[in-house]
Image (cartoon, rainbow, N blue to C red):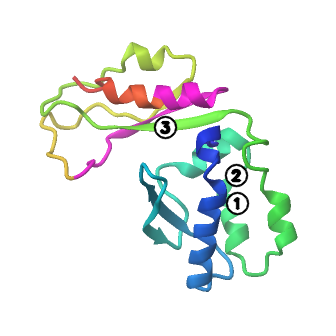
Amino acid sequence: MPATKELESWREAITKQIELLIKTFDIQFGQIHPEYFVTSDGTMYFGEVAYRPPGFKAFELIERAYGFNAYQASFLVFDPKSTKAEVDAFFPREVVDAKGYAGCFGVYPKRRVVSQLEMPKECVEHPYFDFHELQAPAEETVPERDAFGTHWGLVFFFGDDPIKMRDLLKAQEDLDFYV
C-alpha cells in the first residue's frame, strides 16, 4: 500500500469495473469490497464482492501508508448524508500523498509439526520490518490446509520503495517462521 507503478497502471480499468458493480447494484453510498483476477493476457475476471470494508488489515496498512484513519472514512462514506465535497476533502490523493509503503505477510507453518515460533533474521533484521502479530504455537500438529489455509498471524513492513516492498513480501514465502 500504495500500489507500485505497474499495479497503479490498472487503476482506470479497475475503476471502470467497480463503477459497473455500483451501477448494477444501484449503490448510492457506502463501500464495496470487490475482488478481481487478471490473467496473463490482461483479461480481468470478477471473483466476488461484499458490501463491507476489505479484510486482511487493509485499513491498518492504509493508515500506516497515508496517515489517515480509514475506519473514520468508512463512517463518512456509509453516512447517506455525507456530501461528495466532505468525502473528497477527507481522503488523501492516491499514491501522491502516501508517506511510504506498507505491506503485510500472512504466515502459515511450512511443517506439519512445530514446537516454537522462530522469527527469521532475514525478516526481523530487514530495515522495512515494522512488527508482527505471530504467537507461539498452541499445538504441535499443524492442521491440513484447504486452498491457502488460514494464516497464523501477520508480519508488517514499512519502507520507502514499492519494488523493495514487493520483493520483500515475496521473499517471506521462502522463510520458516515455525520450527
Residue at position x 20%, y 52% in the image? 146
Front one among 49 and 116: 49
Closer to the eye: label 3 or 1: 3
Instruction: In the rendered view, tell whether residue 123 sits above or below residue 103.
Output: above
Residue at position x 81%, y 58% in the image? 90
The image quadrant where one finds the C terminus is: top left
Front one among 132 and 10: 10
Residue placed under numbered mark 2 in the picture:
69
Q: Are marks 2 and 1 in contact (CB under 8 Å)?
A: yes
The amino acid type of the residue labelled 1 equals: Gln
Sort mark 2 into few (<14), some (14-19) or many (20+) by Cα contacts within 10 Å: some
Q: Indicate the position of residue 153 as horizontal and vertical percent values.
A: 37, 39
Q: Indicate the position of residue 167 as horizontal and vertical percent values.
A: 49, 27
Residue placed under numbered mark 3 in the picture:
104
Closer to the eye: label 3 or 2: 3
Instruction: In the rendered view, tell whether residue 149 sits above or below residue 5.
Output: below
Residue placed under numbered mark 1 in the picture:
72
Marks 2 and 1 sit apart, C-alpha to C-alpha, by 5 Å
The amino acid type of the residue labelled 3 equals: Cys
Q: Specify whether residue 31 is in view.
A: no
The amino acid type of the residue labelled 2 equals: Asn
Residue 159 painted magenta: yes
In the rendered structure, which segment of residues is drawn in magenta?
147-168
The image quadrant where one finds the N terminus is: top right
| Label 2 element class | loop
